[in-house]
Amino acid sequence: MKTLGATKIAILVVLAIAGLALLAVPAPEGHPHGFDLRVHGLYIVAFLMTILPIIWFASPKLKQFLQERHDLLKAEIEEAKRNFEIAEQRLEAAKKRAQNLTQEMNDIIAKFRALGEKERDALAHEGAVMSEKLRAEVQFAMEQALKVAKMELRNTIVDEALKVASTRLVETNVSSALVERFVKDLRSRMN
């Protein structure tokens, strides 16, 4: 921070005293309303002579505060963008896994259908019964695999969201015990 010389301090003191003295000038008689430049002009000059030194002293601190706040917000925005990109990448990976699971399920269904048709041709009635059983098993396997994939995706998203939320809560000086209780409560609701 730059230091003020004795001359500058003396000028500021004189301006502040003059400004305060001008504020004490009474309004002339017979002017109950309206704008009188002599009176109101003195008020304006007095105000400026009082406020300008205050602004001069406060501006470096104010500038520093605003710059620190700007830097902090910029860093938080960049972190949020990175987290969003990571979440999008994970979502894409989960979608690809779901598509792969669907393809695998379709392949399994096709294989079992072919096997079921062979059995049906060979054993007629027993083949039809076996085919229905296989379809039910494949359907069950598909449903289970889809449930597992959805649950993994949901848990991953919830874990990331809880990490971000707990980080934000800790940054805003919320007690860590409250944050842990909040996270445990949310996880118990999700299960």
Image (cartoon, helix red, strand yellow):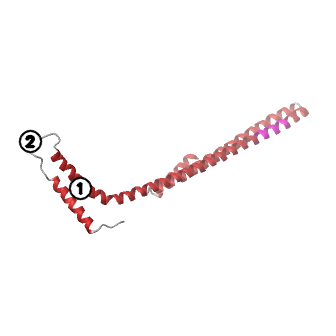
Position in image of residue 119 (x %, y %): 88, 35
The residue depicted at 80 percent of the width and 34 percent of the height is 132
Camera-nearest residue between 131 and 111: 111
The residue depicted at 87 percent of the width and 33 percent of the height is 120
Position in image of residue 114 (x %, y %): 85, 36
The residue depicted at 21 percent of the width and 49 percent of the height is 44
Camera-nearest residue between 93 and 63: 63
Instruction: Quote the CA–CA distance across marks 1 and 2.
Output: 28 Å
Is residue 67 visible in the rendered image? The answer is yes
- Of pointers 1 and 2, the one earlier in the residue sequence: 2
Position in image of residue 30 (x %, y %): 8, 42
Identify residue for label 2: 30
Mark 2 Cα within 10 Å, few/some/many (few <14, many 20+)?
few
Q: Which residues are magenta?
A: 104-114
Q: Is 132 situated left or right of 30 in this image? A: right
Q: Secondary structure at mark 2?
A: loop
Q: Is 61 situated left or right of 50 in this image? A: right
Predominant SS along the magenta part: helix
Q: Secondary structure at mark 1?
A: helix
Q: Which mark is residue 143?
A: none
Q: Is 179 situated left or right of 114 in this image? A: left
Mark 1 Cα within 10 Å, few/some/many (few <14, many 20+)?
many
Is residue 108 part of the magenta span, yes or no? yes
Q: Which mark is residue 50?
A: 1
Residue type for callout 2:
Gly
Q: Is residue 4 above or below residue 132?
A: below
Q: Is 21 situated left or right of 82 in this image? A: left
Position in image of residue 80 (x %, y %): 53, 51
